[in-house]
Amino acid sequence: MNSTGLIYRLTSFGESHGCAIGGVVEGVPAGVRLDIDAIQAFMARRRPGQSTITTQRNEQDQVEFLSGIFEGVTTGTPIGFIVRNNDSRSSDYEAMRHVFRPSHADYTYTAKYGHRDHRGGGRSSARVTIATCVAGAIALQILEQMGVTVRAYTSQIGPIALPHDYTAYDLTTIDSNAVRCPDTKVAEHMEALIKEVRSEGDSVGGIVTCVIQGVPAGWGEPIYDKLHADLGKAILNINAVKGFEYGMGFAGVTKRGSQVYDIFEAQEGHITTRTNHSGGIQGGITNGADIYFRAAFKPTPTLLQPIESVTTTGEATTLESNGRHDPCVVPRAIPVVEAATAMVLLDHYMRNKTTLL
Amino acid sequence: MNSTGLIYRLTSFGESHGCAIGGVVEGVPAGVRLDIDAIQAFMARRRPGQSTITTQRNEQDQVEFLSGIFEGVTTGTPIGFIVRNNDSRSSDYEAMRHVFRPSHADYTYTAKYGHRDHRGGGRSSARVTIATCVAGAIALQILEQMGVTVRAYTSQIGPIALPHDYTAYDLTTIDSNAVRCPDTKVAEHMEALIKEVRSEGDSVGGIVTCVIQGVPAGWGEPIYDKLHADLGKAILNINAVKGFEYGMGFAGVTKRGSQVYDIFEAQEGHITTRTNHSGGIQGGITNGADIYFRAAFKPTPTLLQPIESVTTTGEATTLESNGRHDPCVVPRAIPVVEAATAMVLLDHYMRNKTTLL
Amino acid sequence: MNSTGLIYRLTSFGESHGCAIGGVVEGVPAGVRLDIDAIQAFMARRRPGQSTITTQRNEQDQVEFLSGIFEGVTTGTPIGFIVRNNDSRSSDYEAMRHVFRPSHADYTYTAKYGHRDHRGGGRSSARVTIATCVAGAIALQILEQMGVTVRAYTSQIGPIALPHDYTAYDLTTIDSNAVRCPDTKVAEHMEALIKEVRSEGDSVGGIVTCVIQGVPAGWGEPIYDKLHADLGKAILNINAVKGFEYGMGFAGVTKRGSQVYDIFEAQEGHITTRTNHSGGIQGGITNGADIYFRAAFKPTPTLLQPIESVTTTGEATTLESNGRHDPCVVPRAIPVVEAATAMVLLDHYMRNKTTLL
Amino acid sequence: MNSTGLIYRLTSFGESHGCAIGGVVEGVPAGVRLDIDAIQAFMARRRPGQSTITTQRNEQDQVEFLSGIFEGVTTGTPIGFIVRNNDSRSSDYEAMRHVFRPSHADYTYTAKYGHRDHRGGGRSSARVTIATCVAGAIALQILEQMGVTVRAYTSQIGPIALPHDYTAYDLTTIDSNAVRCPDTKVAEHMEALIKEVRSEGDSVGGIVTCVIQGVPAGWGEPIYDKLHADLGKAILNINAVKGFEYGMGFAGVTKRGSQVYDIFEAQEGHITTRTNHSGGIQGGITNGADIYFRAAFKPTPTLLQPIESVTTTGEATTLESNGRHDPCVVPRAIPVVEAATAMVLLDHYMRNKTTLL
C-alpha cells in the first residue's frame, strides 16, 4: 500500500515524471503552528542539484500545502500537499520504454502490473521520497517542540568509515559538508571517493547512522509493532536500503551476554542504563536512553557506462545512461532517513497516548 | 498492536505465565486441507527441552484449534487457537516482582503500562512466539502447496560462521543437528561453543539465514509495504533480533555499482538474473529469483551468574537466575524465523491477487 | 474481516457448533480493575434459556479469560477469552448438511467459501455475538468509570410500539421484564404477542432503541469514521438488523429545516442545545447531548412450520425445524446492542486522545 | 480518519474554502482504461448551480488527475487528484468566525480541535463529498465493465413519496429531471415543493433509494464487515444522512417471519430467490439478487431566515444567511450515494478475490 503509520499517517502518490508527487498527512495534532519555510528548507536538503556530488537535475521541489492548516495553525484535519514535477525531461527516458534496467524495479513492476510508466522509474523512483520528506518535516517540527531530536549522518561511504560511534561527534554540524558526515576530515575523503567513482561512471554505497535523543521511557508497542521494527520497516522502505541494525546490531552477535547487558542505575529515583548496547529500546519500548540505528545503502545500478540488459521482449541489449544521476545516494538520503524516523516516532507518541485511560 | 498482516493476519494474546498463549488467524483461504500433525511437529522445533543445548523447561506446547477448520478443511473463517501454559513455575519468578532485569523489557513495560506481569517476562517473553509459529505453520503448509519453500538455518554462533552462502548447502538437512546448521562439522563447533558458554553461565548470539524459493515474479508492494520491509519488520519483531539485511546487505556498502547489478538473462521468453545481489526483490517486488536474508540475534541477558540490577524503587540489587534458560536462542529461533517469513509471504500472495481485475 | 475498532479492537473467532467462540480484545487501557462477575452477569442477559420467551437451549456461556489481566487489573496487553460450546446437539443439524435454509446465510457462505460448517449456521449464527458481548461488557465497565452509560431497550415488537421517546421512561428498569421494555404495561402486550407468534410456529420483528448519556462534546471523527456511521456499522453487523437511524432519523424527512434545527443555549459558559433532533452528534462528532438511535430487527426465518427450500444441488425440499429457536430475537439482542455500542464509544474515546499533542 | 476501504481505498483531504479538495485512491486495479470525460460528467451531477433548484454557487469542480494513470490506463499505483476551490467567497463567511451555526459541526469541531476553519464549514462542508465522487466515479466505471450497475434516485421529498418500489420504474431516466426521480409526474410535485420551501427561506428532507444490479453471489464478509454494514457506514458518512435501511428495512419489523423469508428456487442449477425481502444480502454476503437500500436525508439547517444561535463565547445572537444554499440536498446527493456505494462494492469485490487460493 501507499500508506504508513496508524495515527500519524501518510498516504502518498505520484510518479517521477507524472504531474506531481503528493500525499495526505493524517493524524497531525490540532493547534500546532507550523513553520512552512523550515519545511521547505528541509526539502532543499533532499533535492537534486544541491551540491557538486549529487545529480545535476534541477528540481526546485516546491511544496504546495492544500489543506489542514488555517491561519498558520494545524486544524487537526488532513494536510494535503503536492510537489509539481518540473524538470522532467521525459524524452530522456524514451529509450527505456522497452528495456528493463538491471537491479531497478522495471521488470518487477511489469511482472506485477502488466505495464509500467517507464519514465524515470515511475513510482519506483527515489523521487517519491519527497512525500516522506514532507510528512517527516512536519513530524520533526512537532517532535522538536517536545524536546525530541532526530539526526542522521553519513558514517561510511564505500570502505571509508567513521572510526567512532555517534557520541564522539557534534551532530549539529552535519550539513556543513556535502557528504553530511560530522568529521570534516573524513568527509573530505568520502567526497573525493564519490568524485572518483563518478569519474569512472560508477557508483558506491554507504551507511547512514541515525540518533534520536529526548524520547522518554514508554514509547513503543510489544509484539508486532515494536518500535525498532517499525523503524526498521520505515528505513527498509527507503530506496536502495539493504540492511538495518539498531543498538549493538550485527556486531553484538560475537559478544557474550555478560559483556553487553545494560546495567541499570538509579539516580534520584530516575532509572537510566550505564551502557546502551540495547540502543534505547527493550522489548520494543523505549527506556529513555538514546535510540540509534544504522542503514546500509547499496551502490545504485544507474551507471555512466554501458550496461548489459534485456528488452521487454527478452532480447539482449546495451543500456547507455545520461549523466544526471547520483554516484552515491547517501548524502541526499540523510533527510529521508530523518523524515521516515520522525514519522514513526510521532506515530508511536500518539499511540502511546492511548495506553492509559 | 498485537496483529500482523493485512489479509493473512494474526492477532495474538497471552503471557508467559498466564493461562495460555493463543491467537486468531484471519484470511486463511477456504478449502485447504490442513495437516494438524505437521503443525504440531513444527511447534516441537520451537519448544523448550528439545535438545541438550536448550533450556530444560518442559513444555509440550500442544496446540488446540478452536474454529475455522471443518472436517479437516479450512472454512475461510478465522482459526482460533490456544496453547496452555503448563510448566509455569511462577514461584520461581516471585523474586523478580520488584526487580527490573537488565536488557529485558521489565522496566520499559512498567514505564509504559504502570505495572506488569513479572512472571517470566509476561507478554515480553519469547514464549509468545508460539502464536507466530502456529500461524506461520499454517502459512508454510499453504505455501508448500504453491511450490514455495522457506528454510532458515543457523549460519553463525558467536564468532563461528559458515564459510559459504546458502547455495553451498543442502538446506533439507537443517534439523539433523541441534544447532540447525547445514554443515555438520561447523555445527559441532557451534554446539561445543554453546555448551562452553553455558558452563560459564553466559550466553552467546548468532545469525540466522533464511532462504525462500519458488516465489514467482510480482509479489510485493511498492513504497511503504515493500516485501523486504515487511519481512524486515516481521523478523525485527522476533525477540532478541538486533539487525536484518537482505541480498548483499551491509556487505554491499563497500562495493561499486558495476560489481553488483544483476544482469538480466532471457531464456525462452523467461527472464532471470545472472547473479542475485538483489536478494530476489527489486523495488519491493519479487523478481522470481531466490529471496534470502540474514537476522542478527543478540546474546540474551538471562545469565547463570549474579548480575547487577535495580529494584522497582531504584535500589541497587543483585539478580541470581535459575538454570532454565537458553544459553543461545538461535537454534530455537529457526522455526520462528520461518514462521514469521511465511506469514509475510502468504499475506503478500493474497494482496497480489488484488492487483488486477 | 473479523475485527472491529481501531484502538479498542476486537478480533473474534468461532462457530456455533465448533469448540468455542472467542476473541482478542486489544487496546484495553492498562490499570483498570475489572469486575469479572459483572461481565459474566452481562453475558447472562444474552444467553439462551433465560426466560420463557426465548429459545430453551441451555447454554451457560461461561467466559474464560486467558490473558491481559494480572491480579485483577488490566495490563494493557490483549485480553484473550473463550466461551466453550457445550449444548451443541450437532446431530440436530445433520439434516441441514445438504439444504440451504431460506433467508439464512447457508447459500451465501457456500457461494463464497465453496463449502460450509452447516451445524447451526456455523459462523453466521447469532451465537457469535458472544464475542461482541464480552468485549462490550469490558468497554461498558470502563465507560461507566468515566460517567458514560449505554442503555438499550425494546421499543417495538411487531406492531406494538412504545408511545413515547426515551425521555419518558426510567431506563434502569429495563431488565425487570423478559421483553426488556421500560413500560411494564406495554411489555405485557409485547410478551403476549411473542407467545402467540410462537404458538403459531412463526416469528416477529421489533425495534431496539439505544440511549447514550454522559459523553462530552468532541468524541468522533469527521468524514469517513463519523461516530454515528461507526455506530451504524456496528449495529448493522448484528444478526437480523435491517435498519439504523439516529436522532430524528427517517421521521425527519418530512420536516422543514426550521422545525428541527437544534438551537444552542449557553448557560454559564457551557453550551447545550434546546432540542436534540441531531441525536447528540453533529458532523460526526458529539455535542454533549444524549446520543440515541434505533435499530430494526427482522422476524427471523427459523420457523416451527414446514418451509419450502432447496438442497445444495438444487432440488426442491421441505425443511422442518426443531423447537429451540427464538420467536423474536429482540429481547436477547438488547445486551448485544449495548455491547456493540460501548465498543465504538470506547474506541472513539481513545482515538480522541490523539487529537491534540 | 479520512480513509475508507481496505483494498480499494480513498484517503481524502480538503476544506470548503481552502486551496483544494483532493484525495488518493489506492487499490485501483492495473490495466484499466479510464474515461476521464465520463468522470468529469459524473462530477457535474454533483456540482452546485446545475439546476434551478440547487444552490447558485458557481463551481466548475474540474478534477485534475496527478498520478496513477499512464497513457490513459491505470498503472496500479495510487491515483492522486485535486479539485481547486474557485468560487470561494470566503468574505461571505467572516460573520461566522465567531458564531456556531446550529445543527452544523461548528461547535463540535471547536470542541474537538480547539479551533476551526470557519469558512463555509471547513472540512465539515458537504463540498468534501467531491473526493467521494471522484473515487466513486472511477469505481463505477470498473464495476460497469464487470456488469454491475449502481443507480440511486430520489424516492421521497418531504411528504411526497413514490408509490412503488424500484422495480416499477425505469432507472436509466433518473437524470431527465432536476429532482432525479424516475417518475416524471411525481418529480414535478417534488420540484414544486422544493421551490415553495425555498421561497419560504426554509429547507426540506428526503429519501434516496439505491439499487445495485449484477453482483454475483459471494461478495461480502461475515461478522464485522458485512456488506450491508459497510454500505450503511458509507452512506451514513454522507452529510445530512440520518438513517439507512436495506431490504425490507424498518417496514419488516411488523411482519411475521412466515411472510418475509425468501424462498429459494433452482433453475437449471442456478439458485435464485422467489422474493427479495433480504435485499440481496444474507449473513453479510450477496446472494445474487438485486441489492437495494434507502437513506434518509434531513432538512439542512442552513435557512434563508434569521435563526437563533450563540457566539463562540456563549452570547445569544441571530444568524442571517446569504442565498447560496440548497433548499433540499437530495437531488445533488444522488451521485454521492452512487459513488459511496460503488467504492464499497469494488472494495468487497477485491477482498473477495482473497477468499480462495
Image (tube, coloured by chain):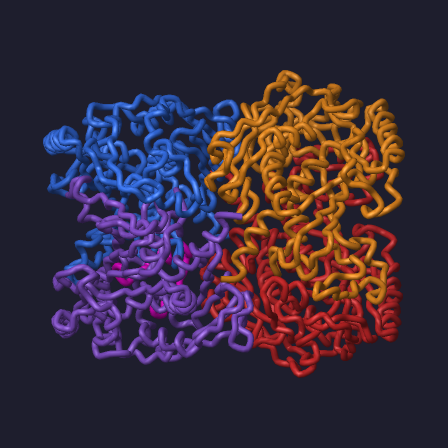
Chain colours: A orange, B red, C purple, D blue
Position of the N terminus of chain A by quadrant: top right
- Relative to B62, say whether D303 is above or below: above
- Name the foreground residue: C321 vs A264: A264
Q: Whole-percent x and y of residue C216?
A: 37, 55
- Residue C107 is inside the magenta segment: yes
Q: Quadrant of residue B301?
A: bottom right
Q: Whole-percent x and y of residue D81?
A: 46, 29
Q: Quadrant of residue D290?
A: top left
Q: Whole-percent x and y of residue D271?
A: 28, 52
Identify the residue at horizontal 72%, vertical 37% (top origin): A240
- Name the foreground residue: C260 vs B38: C260
Identify the residue at horizontal 41%, vertical 57% (top origin): C114
Q: Which residues are magenta?
A: C101-120
- Name the foreground residue: A305 vs B18: B18
Question: Does residue D257 appear anywhere in the picture?
Answer: no
Residue C177 relative to residue D283: left or right: left
- Name the foreground residue: A250 vs D2: D2
- Residue A223 is inside the magenta segment: no
- Relative to D144, say whether B26 is above or below: below
The mark tally for this picture is 0
